[in-house]
């Protein structure tokens, strides 16, 4: 299955006005910004790879990206990050279905270990999170892996950029759908993965730092290779977490882009590879070109 880290790399889409500036192409694939054209489009659209959590000072938007946002009139993200119900829904749907509790998923010894870790290392009483899906709890680990005290999400900063230009934000998925994806993955399996993150925290911290370096250097191919590597995660639930979602997004984009130019900002892990958005759009007949993003 795709590693926990893979889930924290995300996507948005931005629709643009008719007049477009001239965008400079990148000579290789080392970029997070791509232009989609051809296949009957009257205006180009854009793909941009995001990362769920970075140090705020490490998040920078290029002039080309800013120009694309400036010329756009609508933003589609993985979720509608501008809708208060998204946050409220996240709190509601983070819980497991039925009467499942974390203590049901572990032996008494394992649960005590988990409880101590949350209390001592995360300063969070596990009793407050008894019903939470184990995958959702992994998000609490990432601030501890960072070397700064001011983490932020690339999506969050994009929302701020969009608001400056008074752009509307929409979502490709609902929080209910994303919750259902996690509900399709056995909670017992999620629990084992969560415990692996505790037992091998140093390893995952090093992997996280490596992924951040690759992202900052915009090495999209290396990000894809690392995310798919056996030592970083498995592909057991790749269809649920990646392939099926990407295919569904491409179907939506195929319809959206015919009516307006869109800038797609997805988690960088959704862009590359055989089932990534870049390749899937090319298979649809679109031309997808790397753009300079510095």
Image (cartoon, rainbow, N blue to C red):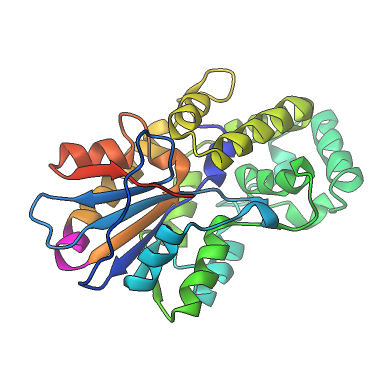
User: Which residue corresponds to the image point at 62% horizontal and 48% vertical from the top-left?
Assistant: 136
Task: Give the percent coordinates (x, y) of residue 114.
Answer: 81, 38
Task: Give the percent coordinates (x, y) of residue 37.
Answer: 18, 51
> Quarter of the image holding residue 18?
bottom left
User: Which residue corresponds to the image point at 78% horizontal and 57% vertical from the top-left?
Assistant: 128
Q: How many marks?
A: 0
Left or right side of 186 for 139? right
Magenta-tinted stretch: 255-260
Task: Give the percent coordinates (x, y) of residue 65.
Answer: 42, 59
Left or right side of 259 for 2? right
Left or right side of 112 for 275? left
From this view, report whether residue 33 is shown above or below residue 45: above
Viewer can see residue 187: no
Viewer can see residue 95: yes
Task: Give the percent coordinates (x, y) of residue 48.
Answer: 41, 51
Name of the residue lying farthest toward the left: 40
> Quarter of the image holding residue 31?
top left
Name of the residue lying farthest toward the bottom: 166
> Is 192 included in the stretch rendered in magenta?
no
User: Which residue corresponds to the image point at 73% horizontal and 32% vertical from the top-left?
Assistant: 205
Overall secondary structure of the magenta section: helix
Return the residue nearer the eye: 192 or 159: 159
């Amino acid at each position: 299955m795709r590693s926990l880290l893979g889930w924290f790399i995300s996507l948005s889409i931005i629709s643009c006005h008719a007049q477009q500036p001239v965008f400079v192409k990148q000579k290789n694939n080392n970029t997070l910004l791509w232009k989609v054209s051809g296949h009957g489009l009257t205006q180009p659209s854009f793909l941009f790879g995001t990362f769920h959590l970075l140090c705020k000072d490490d998040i920078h938007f290029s002039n080309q990206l800013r120009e694309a946002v400036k010329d756009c009139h609508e933003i589609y993200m993985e979720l509608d990050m501008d809708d208060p119900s998204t946050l409220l829904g996240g709190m509601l749907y983070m819980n497991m279905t039925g009467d499942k509790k974390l203590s049901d998923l572990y032996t008494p010894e394992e649960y005590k270990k988990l409880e101590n870790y949350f209390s001592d290392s995360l300063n969070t009483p596990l009793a407050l999170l008894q019903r939470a899906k184990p995958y959702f709890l992994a998000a609490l680990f990432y601030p501890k892996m960072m070397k700064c005290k001011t983490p932020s999400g690339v999506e969050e900063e994009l929302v701020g950029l969009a608001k400056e230009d008074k752009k509307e934000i929409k979502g490709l998925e609902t929080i209910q759908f994303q919750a259902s994806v996690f509900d399709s993955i056995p909670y017992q399996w999620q629990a084992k993965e969560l415990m692996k993150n505790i037992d091998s925290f140093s390893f995952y911290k090093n992997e996280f730092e490596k992924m951040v370096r690759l992202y900052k250097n915009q090495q999209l191919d290396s990000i894809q290779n690392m995310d798919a590597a056996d030592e970083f995660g498995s592909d057991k639930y790749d269809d649920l977490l990646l392939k099926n979602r990407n295919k569904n997004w491409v179907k939506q984009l195929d319809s959206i882009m015919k009516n307006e130019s869109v800038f797609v900002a997805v988690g960088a892990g959704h862009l590359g590879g055989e089932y990534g958005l870049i390749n899937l759009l090319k298979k649809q007949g679109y031309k997808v070109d790397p753009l300079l993003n510095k």
